[in-house]
Every structure is written in C-alpha cells, then in structure tokens.
Amino acid sequence: MSTALEHETVLTLPAVAPFSFARTLGFVCGFAPTRGQQEAGDGRLVAALRAEGRTVLATVTSAEDADGAGAAGVRVALRADRPVPDEVADAAADRITSWLSLDDDLTGFYALARDDASFWPVVERLYGYHQVRFPSPWENVVWAILTQRTPMPVAQRAKQALTEHVGNAIVADGRTWWAFPDAAQVAALDPAVLRDLVGNDRKATYLHASAQRWTALDERELRSAPYDSVRELLLGLPGIGPWSASFVLIRGLGRMEEVSPDREMLRAASRAYGVAVGEADLARLAERYGVWAGYWAHYLRAGS
C-alpha cells in the first residue's frame, strides 16, 4: 500500500470534438457499478488504475485547446510511489482513452440525430458527451457475472470485497483508492477464497474460469475485430450469455454497432418518443442510426 506518491507524470490526451469533460463527470457521478472507486467533481476525475501490472493514481482534468475556446481533451497526472516508466504511462493513457471514449467521433451520429425531432432534445442535453465505459472490459465482465439475478447492493459488496482482497491500494489525499484487479490477479486466486469473497459458488467458478481465459485475449484487438467474432469470444466466457455479451461489447469495448433491448431501454425510448415503444418499434427506430445504434441507445438511457 502506497503512502507517499512522490513521482508524477503528466500526459495530455486528445479527444475528438465535440467533447465535453463536464458531461463526462456528470455521468461518472451517477454510474452505480463503479460508485466509490473514483471521485468525480470540482472539475476533476480521480481514480486508481492498473497499467502494465502497476497501480497508479490518475487525476483527470479538462485540457483546453490552444485558443481557450473549449475542451480539446484531458490532462492526466499519474502519481505513484516510484518512477512511472514509459510503458506504464502508455498503458494508462490507453486505458483512460478507452474508458472515456476520447477517440469517438460523434459527428456522423449527431448528423443523423438532427433529423430525428423526438430524439434531438436528448442530444442537446448531452451534447459533447462521449460514452463513459467501464474502466476496463474485464471489469465489465466481472460486473455482468456478479449482477446476475442479484440485487445491485449485493453485487457492489461482492465486487468491493474482491477488490480489497487483491489489494491494489494507494493512500493519497486523505483516502484509500482501490484499483480493480487484473484478470491475471483474479485467475491466481484460490477458487475457495474467491467463493468466500463473492458469496456464491457458481459465480466464483465463472469468474475464475473467465479470468483464466481473459488473460489470453488482446483487449485492443477486441475493440476493432469483426463484431460477430468478438461476440462469439465473449459468449465463450463462462457465465456470459447473449445479454451480457452485448453489455460488454457496448460498455466495456465501445462497440456501438448493435442494440440489445431490455425494459429500461424500452422505457427510455417511450419517454423520448412520447409513445409506447416495444421491441419491434425499438429495432425500427434504431435502424436509421446504423453503426451508431449503440450510441443512440446509450444516449436514450443517459439523457431521456
């Protein structure tokens, strides 16, 4: 456990305009699956992250463009108890870029949305918001398993117990920051210990086996490989079914090509469009957005 973070590395990560860091913070504050892991407010996002087997504390703030006209991306201060080598800084930069979807170019999505009179007010409320994903797709996999037929508070306690047991902790700024464990760290746990931590033998078995398989996957390839092949890989993970695979594709990997309907999505669409929306209606509405269907669905959830 670190107590003195004497080393700092500062990075500037670009974001594709339009980008609103304020919208990012607004979403993080209300995202229940990662509640308590980070601090979001007062213009900054602070979280402990794993990068190349190291735990670092990242403080993320808005980076203004050259003429001060708006956010050009984010400034990241990485703090640690020993020097941060380039490979760790690069891995942390990749993690944050993915987490905050800084590379997403929303201009095509917004162009389609302008012609959708019922949906455009949702875009206006969220304009410049890039999807905030789970900090890593592996964390998304774990959350998908822990929440199966389980109340969210119970899943949150199990997740926190797992995180604290592995112990990727940094003490700074008057509190302890916990980084979610890598798949390799979960795979190395005794299955009996994992069962005690999550309180469910079946889920512990799923987590242990999925962690072992995840260590053989390349996250960067999963972000860009053919959608159907990535979906099949996810379905091959123990405990991951069709809904969970779609969940991880969108919220873990930023794959926005398809929509997975559920009751919350139908309610959000009904609010935005002012009529009762069923699954067939949702599919019809999503069709106009093509590869942006996932973003359309996410904006509905976040802003309607």
Image: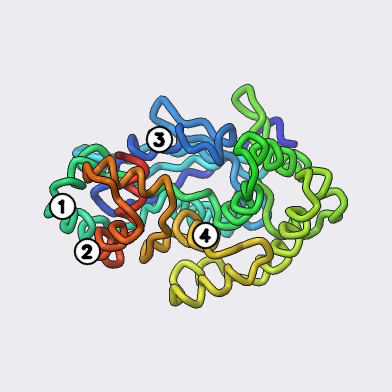
Tell me the element at label 4.
Answer: helix
Quarter holding the C terminus is top left
Q: Earlier in the sequence, mark 1 or mark 3?
A: 3
Q: Amino acid at mark 1?
A: Asp
- Kindly report the distance in space between the C-alpha atoms of the residues bearing marks 2 and 3: 29 Å
- The structure residue drawn at horizontal position 34% and vertical position 52%, both measured from the top left corner, is 297
| CA distance separating discs 1 and 2 | 10 Å
CB-based contact (under 8 Å), mark 1 and mark 4: no
Q: Which residue is mark 2?
A: 288
Q: Residues within 10 Å of mark 1 (few under 14, many from 20)?
A: some
Labels 2 & 4 near each other (Cβ < 8 A): no
Q: Amino acid at mark 3?
A: Leu
Q: How many numbered markers are drawn?
A: 4
Q: What amino acid is labelled 2 in the image?
A: Arg
Pointer 1 with pointer 2, Cβ within 8 A: yes
**In the image, 129: left or right of 133?**
left
The residue mark sitting in front, 4 or 3, is 4
Query: Earlier along the polypeptide chain: callout 1 or callout 4?
Result: 1
Residue pictured at 21% horizontal, 57% vertical: 107
CA gap, disc 4 to disc 3? 27 Å
Q: Residue at position x 64%, y 38% from top?
A: 156
Expressed as whole percent of the image width and height from the top left, the position of residue 129 reads 31, 44
- In three-dimensional space, the C-alpha distance between marks 2 and 4, rounded to whole angstroms, equals 22 Å
Front of the two marks 2 and 3: 2
| Residue 15 seen | yes
Q: Which residue is mark 1?
A: 116
Lower sequence index among marks 2 and 3: 3
Residue that badge 4 annotates: 243
Q: Is residue 182 above or below residue 42?
A: below
Q: Element at badge 3?
A: helix
- Pick whichever of labels 1 and 2 is earlier in the sequence: 1
